[in-house]
Image (cartoon, rainbow, N blue to C red):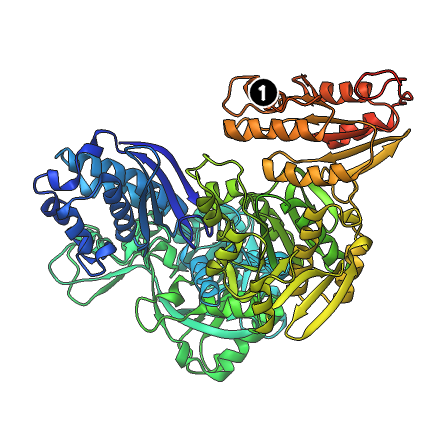
Amino acid sequence: MTILEHRALRGPNYYSRYPAIYMRLDIGDLEERPSDTVPGIVERITALLPTLQEHRCSVGRPGGFLERLGRGTWAGHVVEHVAIELQNLIGFSVGYGKTVDSYQKGIYNVVYRYRDEACGLAAGIEAVELVNRLFHTAEIDMPAIIDRLKAVRDAHMLGPSTASIVAAAERRGIPYTRLSEENSYIQFGQGHRQQRIQATVTGHTDLIGFGIADDKEWTKQVLGDAGIPVPRGRVCGSFEEALEAIRAIGYPVAVKPVIGNHGRGVSTNIEDDQALHDAFSIAAHRNPAVIVEQYIRGEDHRLLVIDGKLVAAARRRPAHVVGNGVDTLQALVDEENRDPRRGVGHENLLTQIQLDEQSLRLIDQQDLTLQGVIPAGEMVFLKSTANLSTGGTATDVTDDVHPEVRYAAERIARLVGLDIIGIDLLAETLTRPLEEQSAAVVEVNAGPGFRMHLSPTHGSGRDVGQHVIDMLFPDSETDARIPITAVTGTNGKTTTVRLLSHLLRQAGRNVGMACTGAIEIDNHVIMRGDYSGPQAAAIVLREPTVEYAVLEVARGGIMRRGLGFDECDVGVLLNIASDHLGEHDIHTLDELARCKTVVIDAVSKSGTAVLNADDPRVLAGQEWARGDIIFFTLNPDSRAIRQHVRDHGVAFTVHNERIVMRQGHVEAEVIPVVDVPLTFEGHARFNVANALAASAAAYALGLSIADIQMGLRTFHPTPGQNPGRTNLIEADGIKVLIDYGHNVPALEALGELVGCISARRRIGVASAPGNRRDEDLFTLGTLLARMHDVVYIYETDPRGRAIGDAAGLLRDGAESVGSDCRVEIIMEEAQAVDRAFDEASEGDLLVLLIDDVEGAIERFRGRRFTPPSSTDPSGEPT
């Protein structure tokens, strides 16, 4: 078997409303060998993956997939189920999948859900290899497969602290985006409503507070000056200075680097000069400035304060083992590390105990050796600090915190100035006020770990991630989302997107817009190019100033990567017509329609689908639409519109050459069509339809009729406002119409407008990408010949064809008409445009279907054109 394509679909897509992995799989000779021809396949796969018994498949009950396997199914279908189950086995709960035939024998489109993209892709690769071996009765090393997948998981997974915040956001329906694979840098929400975190540091974390927490001496000064009990101590730059500090403080002491975390370089309960020398060396290795301070006897506690409120407290104990009277200390440590809760770093609830220099010193201080047997019940401490990252354990004591201790913790957070703070407190107990016992704050932490509170070794876990989300998004009535409008269809997408963005901007909204041509933020172009896919959506939704997102969605982006967002507030479906058929296994108009309906299927339940009632396939696609429906139509008397309006649905249409909004018995006039510059006084009927679509979407977003009217009146078909889309300019008596009509329906619509513009001759410059079908290119050529007196054909992108092939098909179509149209192939766009300029004279109309709009306009404005010669367009003397 061979994987031909393999990628993540990020958001709603052609196959699923949820993110999924897409695999185009060639099963090769296994096309002739369904599963019922492989002896013992059900028994073997059940032994390898017993949990496949839970897969219902199309049978609809547990064991359904195994029944299908026994009756006979193809290898691609088996890959789907194995890829799903492999993800479940490494901790990702997924269940959805589907496998569909392609138009090529032996090639299947395999789709399955994922939670983590890297793990989903890796599971697919492992599934193909496993199933290939299964069908060929080869050996399968299941533990090795799981180990490889776990390695991928561990390399990409979020730490428990960040993961808890992400989980809380998901429960509230707040979208999140991982902004970096290398660290836990996460964006919650969209646009101007977004919040960002890195691990447990938020975008609101105070920089000064962070600095205080990072400097232990500064922390002691701030807290000590405020009357918070802190250990007496001194910063030392040498061992000699440490000895001087001892004379003032006295033994026992604790030694720690001024700057550090996770207990690294910290030694406690130092009672003599030699131990002080060793501890000083350990700390100085981390930072040349070392704190020597009073050792406070008591239990180690962590108090977690979020948004000024104490939300969790834990008693921590350093890594330790308890003797059983039989095993040596080394054996006890080894046994403790076999606890499945222990892992490397932060991957599990507990961390493996690593015996280092500090551990050996503590063991020696207790007059023990690694080879000695520890008496039953005796506790041996292996670390001097209680950090979980060094193997410590935690017990939840949140419910045991005295009100005075709670107040002190919350006051410390205010004094330091941190929105999330971990306070390390040594105290005999948290049930009594600090002044009544031996107690002191030894450290505070910015960006503290949550693991000990989420899953303590003993006691109840606390959902502290929820407190972070509630702090970042305090008003549950205020969504973290911004309104997203997604526009799709075969033609008119870019114009509708630009017009809707203009309507919103005129109404005072900050808009992020992405289309074929550019990404614009707050009316500033930030990127140029084709941005009609999910990458553009991600860029717009990351912008901190954007209040409304308006996104063009092309068929290619849906098929390659999905929408790039989970849902939209308004989905606009303009039309369905023949274009790019044959790509991505979309061969029919019905399949193309299903692809386009992904946008309206992604509308939120409280959102709106805007549909073209004049297009039968769009009208039929309303079964996929979510939320409310607003129709737009050039035919106000259609049965579907009349019924929709009678049912108090909203429709935008044209009545007496005026754009109107209808609902129930109400008809509200928006604007006369002739007052909408985009429509060329109503002659550009395709732009009348685009204006209706944009008006309907704007209305769904809450704009008033007056807002819509003002926007329609002030949007012009110029290169500045709508570059490359029906731009009409004039100089020296020459008219130039620039458009992007590169498919048959678009050219048919444009032909109506061209016929309405008076001209002595019509000279065209046109091309089409090579990924159109032969018949489409030929038909485009016939349309060009019928529209023009002269056509110059160029070729921009052969897209898999031989150079000149696409241009030749266009020429053949044009010449087949048998008209007087003169056809010439000039392969380069710029040369073809210049040739048209050379040909043109006063009274002519140039129709430029080109990509380089700015370059053509610049050259056009720099030319002087000659008056027409004394011959008419047919060449006869006048």
The quadrant of the picture occupied by the C terminus is top right
The quadrant of the picture occupied by the N terminus is top left
The kind of residue tagged 1 is: Asp
Tell me where residue 174 appears, x and y as whole percent: 51, 63
- The one nearer the camera, 43 or 592, is 592
Image label count: 1
Could you tell me which secondary element the residue under label 1 belongs to?
A: helix
For mark 1, does the 10 Å Cα neighbourhood hold few (<14), some (14 to 19), or many (20 or more) residues?
A: some
- The one nearer the camera, 26 or 460, is 26
Residue appearing at x 64%, y 45% in the figure: 492
Residue appearing at x 67%, y 68% in the figure: 662
Q: Is residue 782 above or below residue 633?
A: above
Residue appearing at x 86%, y 18% in the figure: 871
Q: Is residue 482 shown to the viewer in this render?
A: no
Tell me where residue 562 appears, x and y as whole percent: 48, 47
Residue 670 is left or right of residue 187, and the answer is right
Q: Is residue 780 shown to the viewer in this render?
A: yes
Residue 319 occupies quadrant: bottom left
- The one nearer the camera, 644 or 232, is 644
Determine the residue located farthest toward the left in the rendered image: 39
Q: Is residue 542 above or below residue 148?
A: below
Residue 54 is left or right of residue 817, and the answer is left
Tell me where residue 317 appears, x and y as whole percent: 34, 65
**Residue indicated by mark 1:** 812
Tell me where residue 745 appears, x and y as whole percent: 60, 40
Residue 620 is left or right of residue 860, and the answer is left
